[in-house]
């Protein structure tokens, strides 16, 4: 063996060590990238909640506790732990959760009603009503403001247009899972009964479905004098009638 042989062998060993080091570094970088990706997915999962089709930001403890006070004798069994925020309008927030009856329940938090101090258990809708393409009701209100809340279950819908009491209309963007909420100013039954048409719109502003839903009913005495304004004669959220608009070109 010449004196050049050990030097060549040493250089070869150095090259081999460098290659092994680079491979090890690449493996560590790949492993770190996988860990980072898992961390991002985990953080994303923390930011959302719900069950199956119902998604949104997890509801605060006060809302979860409110759903927990629902009276089962009314026919529903909400799942408080699945409650999520599904839509907002200013300081009014709409929360929803699933129930054992294959429908959902809602609760509304407003500036005039703190669910933590004034729990009411929320409002649950029947499975038949929940399956309607458009559902709406007035779950909360004051002497000069009512909260319109509901859900649009129509493919492609991103907003809903509603006829207000004075004949004008308002377009409301849908939140998660098709829910919506809007504060409506004006005295209840200001113009008598209120049975507006709600029109679901797609991203191009084209109607994809429409329903007329009774929201307010003015009760009168035998002589026709107005006595009070209450909920609709039909069950809250019941579509009467429902109509699908032709969306063909």
Image (tube, rainbow, N blue to C red):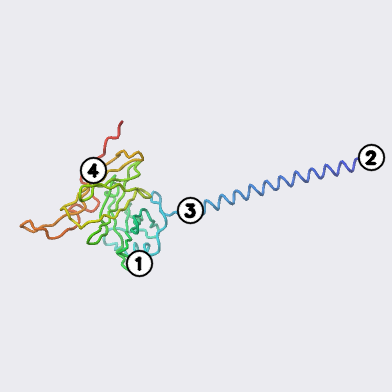
The reply to whether the C-beta atoms of the residues labelled 2 and 4 are less than 8 Å apart is no
Q: Earlier in the sequence, mark 1 or mark 4?
A: 1
Q: Earlier in the sequence, mark 3 or mark 4?
A: 3
Specify the farthest residue to the left.
Answer: 223
- For mark 3, does the 10 Å Cα neighbourhood hold few (<14), some (14 to 19), or many (20 or more) residues? few
Secondary-structure class at tag 1: loop
Per the rendering, the mark at residue 79 is none
Quarter of the image with the N terminus is: top right
Tag 1 residue: 116
* Distance from the alpha carbon under mark 1 to that under mark 2: 89 Å
Secondary-structure class at tag 3: helix
- For mark 2, does the 10 Å Cα neighbourhood hold few (<14), some (14 to 19), or many (20 or more) residues? few
- For mark 1, does the 10 Å Cα neighbourhood hold few (<14), some (14 to 19), or many (20 or more) residues? some
Tag 2 residue: 2
Q: Is residue 85 left or right of residue 146?
A: right
Tag 4 residue: 242
For residue 16, above or below residue 43: above
Secondary-structure class at tag 2: loop
Residue 117 location (% of width, % of height): 33, 68
Residue 228 location (% of width, % of height): 15, 60
Residue 76 location (% of width, % of height): 30, 58
Residue 204 location (% of width, % of height): 35, 38
Between residue 159 and residue 134, name the one nearer to us.
159
* Distance from the alpha carbon under mark 3 to that under mark 1: 26 Å
Tag 3 residue: 45
- For mark 4, does the 10 Å Cα neighbourhood hold few (<14), some (14 to 19), or many (20 or more) residues? some
For residue 32, above or below residue 70: above
């Amino acid at each position: 063996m010449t004196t050049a042989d050990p030097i060549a062998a040493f250089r070869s060993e150095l090259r081999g060590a460098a290659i092994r080091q680079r491979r090890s570094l690449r493996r560590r970088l790949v492993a770190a990238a996988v860990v980072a990706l898992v961390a991002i997915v985990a953080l994303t999962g923390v930011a959302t909640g719900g069950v199956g089709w119902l998604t949104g930001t997890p509801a605060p403890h006060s809302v979860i506790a409110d759903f927990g006070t629902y009276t089962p004798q009314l026919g529903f069994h909400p799942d408080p732990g699945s409650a999520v925020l599904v839509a907002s309008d200013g300081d009014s927030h709409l929360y929803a959760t699933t129930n054992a009856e294959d429908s959902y329940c809602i609760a509304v938090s407003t500036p005039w009603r703190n669910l933590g101090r004034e729990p009411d258990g929320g409002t649950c809708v029947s499975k038949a009503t929940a399956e309607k393409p458009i559902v709406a009701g007035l779950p909360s209100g004051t002497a000069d403001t009512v909260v319109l809340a509901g859900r649009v279950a129509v493919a492609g819908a991103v907003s809903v247009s509603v006829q207000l009491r004075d004949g004008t209309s308002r377009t409301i963007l849908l939140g998660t899972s098709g829910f919506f909420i809007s504060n409506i100013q004006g005295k209840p039954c200001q113009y008598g009964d209120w049975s507006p048409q709600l029109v679901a719109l797609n991203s191009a502003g084209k109607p994809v479905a429409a329903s007329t839903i009774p929201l307010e009913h003015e009760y009168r005495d035998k002589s026709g004098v107005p006595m009070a304004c209450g909920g609709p004669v039909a069950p809250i959220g019941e579509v009467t009638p429902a109509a699908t608009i032709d969306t063909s070109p």
